Image (spheres, rainbow, N blue to C red):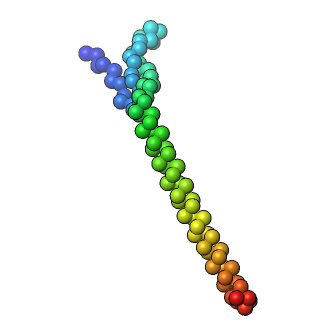
Amino acid sequence: MSTMLQSENLEGKRAELHYDKETKQLYYEYIDIPKTDIESLQEATKELKLAITESAEAQQRDKIENQLAVAELVETLTNKEVL
């Protein structure tokens, strides 16, 4: 009794069954499935949301660094009795 070769379920790919005449073996070749317009837009939206989040985080870090720098400057000026 022979068992049928099972394909893997790979996201974004489809399996094509092939036969190698030399080795007399069956094998699967996995072909990319083109993305639909909606899938492409969803992917682009996800990337934009990630970029916006990263930008907001960078702005928050910059704001905190600036506040710390101002506090250090005020402390230095206060200690030198400039203020």
Residue 29 in the image: x percent, y percent?
44, 20
| Residue found farthest to the left | 1
Name the quadrant containing residue 16.
top left
52 vs 39: above or below: below
| Residue found farthest to the bottom | 81
Residue 60 in the image: x percent, y percent?
54, 64
> Is 80 on the left-hand or right-hand side of 67?
right
| Residue found farthest to the top | 21
How many tags in the picture?
0
Name the quadrant containing residue 9.
top left
Q: Nearer the viewer, residue 13 or 36?
A: 36
Residue at 63% from the left image edge and 70% from the top image edge: 66
> Is 25 on the left-hand or right-hand side of 69?
left
Q: Nearer the viewer, residue 1 or 82?
A: 82
> In the rendered view of the protein, which quadrant contains the C terminus?
bottom right
Residue at 57% from the left image edge and 61% from the top image edge: 59
Residue 33 in the image: x percent, y percent?
42, 25
> In the rendered view of the protein, which quadrant contains the N terminus?
top left
Name the quadrant containing residue 75.
bottom right
Residue at 52% from the left image edge and 49% from the top image edge: 51
71 vs 61: above or below: below
Residue at 47% from the left image edge and 9% from the top image edge: 22
Residue 55 in the image: x percent, y percent?
55, 55
